[in-house]
Image (cartoon, rainbow, N blue to C red):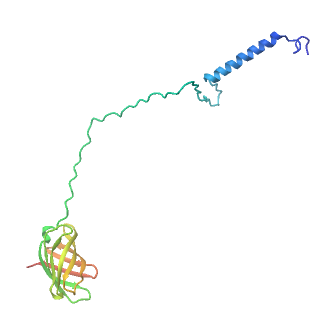
Amino acid sequence: MHPGLGPERRGVGYWASWATIAGVVIAVIGTVVAHNDAKPVATPGTAVSTPPAQVITTGPITPPPQVITPPPQVTTKAPVTTIAAATPYRVPKGFVGTWRGPIDQSGSKPYSVIATVTSGAVGDSLGTVEYPELQCQGIWRLESGTANSIRVTELIDGGTTCIQTISITLILQDGQLRYYIEDPQVRGTLKRGS
């Protein structure tokens, strides 16, 4: 080692200068960290991130006042749409009257029907029905319908030779009333008559 430069030869002033410099550096670093004022340094190809701020408080924390902004008022009115109430189905006038005709039922002798159809809505009784050769009678109750067909439930309330309750489809075609039962298969063509 060179004489006069070794640690044993340095004086108090030398070490005091370094201690002062070190103290200043530590104070500066502490201040920068405490106040988060350090500016990040980026080198090409690296991401820069800023550390989250630290808040030092000595008393109770009061949240900032909230500002509530009402939504803008709409000054235009929406158009009003009027929906007409559904008109309940009613038996078309073409079905109203008295109808007669032969009935053909698979596995049975031919017989006739006389039906008087009145106006009505779904669920209503539409008049009377009679099967003279079978000696039974009853009513037809409307189930559903279209412009040219109605579906009725036949309810027999007199006689024992007819099925007590069955659905029948009646189709108005060419001034005649077509009579259909699916099971058992029954078909008929009725004409207006008294």
State whether residue 19 appears in this view. yes
Seen from this angle, which residue lies furthest front? 59
Whole-percent x, y for residue 132 in the image: 15, 86
Query: Which image quarter holds the C terminus?
Result: bottom left
Q: 17 or 193, which is in the foreground?
A: 17
Query: Which image quarter holds the N terminus?
Result: top right
Whole-percent x, y for residue 48 in the image: 62, 29
Left or right: residue 63 versus residue 107 is right
The quarter of the picture where residue 17 lies is: top right
Q: Is residue 123 above or below residue 29?
A: below
Q: 157 or 131, which is in the foreground?
A: 157
Left or right: residue 10 versus residue 178 is right
Name the residue at 77% across, 15% down: 19
Name the residue at 68% across, 18% down: 27
Seen from this angle, which residue lies furthest bottom? 109
Whole-percent x, y for residue 28 in the image: 67, 18
Name the residue at 31% across, 34% down: 73
